[in-house]
Amino acid sequence: MLVMQEKKGMPSLIALLVIILFILGYISYRAVNLVTELTTDLYNHPYAVSTAVLRINANIMNIQLTMKDVLQATTPQEVRAYQQIIDQDDALVLSDFQLVKDRFLGNPKMVRDALQGYLAWKSLREQVITLVLNGKASEAAAISSGADALQAGKSADKINAILNFAKNKAHSFQSDTQDIRTRALQLLLLSFGVAIFLVAIIFRRAINLEKNLREINEHLEEKVAKRTSKLAAANEEMIALNEEVTAMNEEIIAVNETLERRVEERTAELSGSFQELKATEEELWAQFDNLQETQEKLNDEKRLTEALFDSVPGMLYLYNDQGKLVRWNKQHEKMTGYSTDELSGRDLLAWYKGDDETIAHISNAVKKALREGFAEAEADLQRKDGTKLVAYMTAVPVKIDGKMHFAGFGIDIAARKKAEEEMIVTLEKAERANLAKSQFLANMSHEIRTPMNGIIGMTDLILTTDLHEEQRDYLTIVKSSTISLLRVLNDILDYSKIEAGKIELEKSVFDLKKTMNEVVDLFDIGARQKGLSLTLKIDERVPDQIVGDSVRLRQVLSNLVGNGIKFTYQGEVRIDVAVEEQSDQQVKIRFKVTDTGIGIGEEKLDKLFKRFSQVDESNTREFGGTGLGLAISKKLIEIMDGAVDVESKENVGSSFFFTAVFGLPEEEVADAKKEIDCTQPKQRKNAKSKKVLLAEDDEVSKKIVTIMLERKGYKVVAVQNGMEAIAAFEDGKFDLILMDINMPYMDGYSATVIIRAKEELLNCRTPIIAMTAYALNGDREKCLDAGMDDYISKPISLEQTMNLIERYVRIAN
């Protein structure tokens, strides 16, 4: 029975042993985890927070230094470059604040307060940068040295509070780690003791069990032989189990040793990190020392600025919000005659001693400066000795300690005012001289064109009669010479108008290809007479319709092509037209005129495009001319937003090329083509019974026009002046009036105005065409403004004049 009881107790002991070993393993596992968690907590949080706070302080110092650079920046580009640096440091600071917020072991309110202080300082910094970018450096400096510095200090105090907490936490790390290690070792030793105690109990129970079994075996050896063998086997199993328990204890000891070694290694790592943290702190203190040195340098700069302030050759002043003088330079005292004590607190309006108009002027200038950021004014200041100081003064607002001041600069402009008055007198004289020159050119044009009109008109009339071949040749030479003389006159007048800035380009739609062909047709006969080939090549990308001044373009091309033919004996003259640039609204076209003529030496190219200058200036030069053609062409090309240049080689040929900018029509306008077509010569109908009133005081011109009209079947009534023209108009009805401008007693302008007034009462309108020798810029507009319908410049072309007359007669009827 006793044997059976002992057998039943063995499984319970084994189960108890297993439970004890499980408990010991769990306790060891928890001990290891506890040590690891505590170590991780002590390692990650205080160290990470301390490092982040130190980085925050370092970045804040960098931001403060960069902000000082912003205040000293001279250009917006420098300010924006410094702003980028500040934004980068600001992003790092905010990132570190987030890390501190996540791992800080103290009161979270400390982190929130520090972050709010930093954000408030950030807002002030952005305000300072905005003021600097807007040119308000003084106001920015005031904010930076006042509220900005105060807010930065508050933020730094709150950040340093977090740093001190983290440092204290880090300093307590060693002792906390040692306590954890001691508790872990004590726990392990307690586990070992419990294990040994339990093993001893198990061994003792096993020995007692074995003794009892031997005593029972001695009494029951025969009856329980088989049972004895089983117990022996159980004893062997117990021994094996004991060995396993011993092995497990050895493993537990090894695990504890490994845990202890890991704790020692982690402790060493934390100690190294603490040393690095200490080195970082020393480095930051070194940066702080450098910051102090920088501050001393800034103080030196301030003293230098004050010295420069006093050396400025003009008055510098600063008035407070009450209009009292609070800062000035030495030159201010010198220019006004007042001492330092007399200037201190002097009222702004005291300089004007009851001059109400000037006081109002200055007050308005100050208000404008405070409203718009800048103002300027000229005024007479009263010096101490009673004399006047004529000053030009400026004012800009400056905010100091929350109050609005204004600063400015003043200079003595008495000499400048005198020079301005002298310049006004000089300009008036120049204007009168320019008017006299314009009047002279107008008179010269009129006096020259009037006899030329007679020569060309009579020549045209004679050429329409039956003549011998020799007579016709002589008259043709007379007409050619007169046209050459007219070209010289036109060159002189054109250059005079260009110099006076009175050339205005027309903006009308025209066919470029048609214009180019007209130029070729004009010179084709002359080229063939010299045995030359005149060719035109227009690139297919060149638009058909462009907007510009076709007359001036034709003038430039005619000059270049005419020169090419004149200076070429054999070969060809070629015109090339191509597009250089094109957009939706305009096109730049490149024109090139190339010849195989005599060419120009490189040393003589600089004489081209200069007025009254020719390449060959000798008395025996072969080619004539005024020397104005290329100069006029260059000016016209520049007015057309283009440029001209030349390439030439002596005895090889020359290439003149120029560009001009033209507009593009929004759409093809059929009306424009229609208008062009209606200016072409028409089949003339019988003009019998058509009556024309001719107002002309020059007998030659009167005779030419009368003969021309009578040959075409018109009835002509000729009068001498404007008064006779009005009287003739009142006596009879006319289909057309040809009105000269410059006539005795009453000119053509006045006569036209009176006739138009009378027509309003009669409810009719007679076409009036001006026929005048005035051909300067603005003469056509004057005629149209007076009520005339069109304008003919003398000397007149009989064919063109008849086309124009018949056109208006046809329209009127």
Image (cartoon, rainbow, N blue to C red):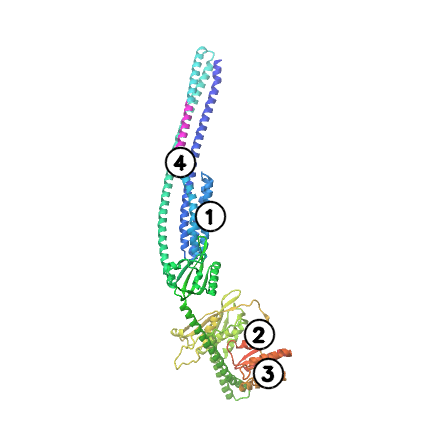
Packing grade of label 2 (10 A; few <14, some 14-19, many >=20) is few
Q: Is residue 377 visible?
A: yes
Tell us which disc is closer to us: 4 or 1.
1
- Identify the element where label 4 is drawn: helix
Q: Is residue 803 visible?
A: no
Q: Mark 3 belongs to which amino acid?
A: Ile
Q: Which residue is mark 3?
A: 726
Is residue 14 left or right of 762 when viewed as pictured?
Answer: left
State the separation of the CA atoms marked 3 and 2: 34 Å
Q: Mark 2 belongs to which amino acid?
A: Ile
Q: Residue at x 42, y 36 (%)?
A: 42
Quadrant for the C terminus in the image: bottom right
- Identify the element where label 3 is drawn: helix
Q: Write the start and end of the magenta stretch as one range.
A: 168-196
Q: Which residue is mark 4?
A: 173
Q: Mark 1 belongs to which amino acid?
A: Ala
Name, please, the residue furthest toward the top: 219
Residue 192 lies in the magenta stretch? yes
Q: Which residue is mark 1?
A: 120
- Identify the element where label 2 is drawn: helix
Earlier residue among tags 4 and 3:
4
Name, please, the residue furthest toward the right: 763
Where in the figure is residue 312, as x and y percent of width and height?
Answer: 37, 61
Where in the figure is residue 713, as x and y percent of width and height?
Answer: 61, 85
Earlier residue among tags 1 and 3:
1
Tell us which disc is closer to us: 1 or 3.
1
Name, please, the residue furthest toward the bottom: 468
Earlier residue among tags 4 and 1:
1
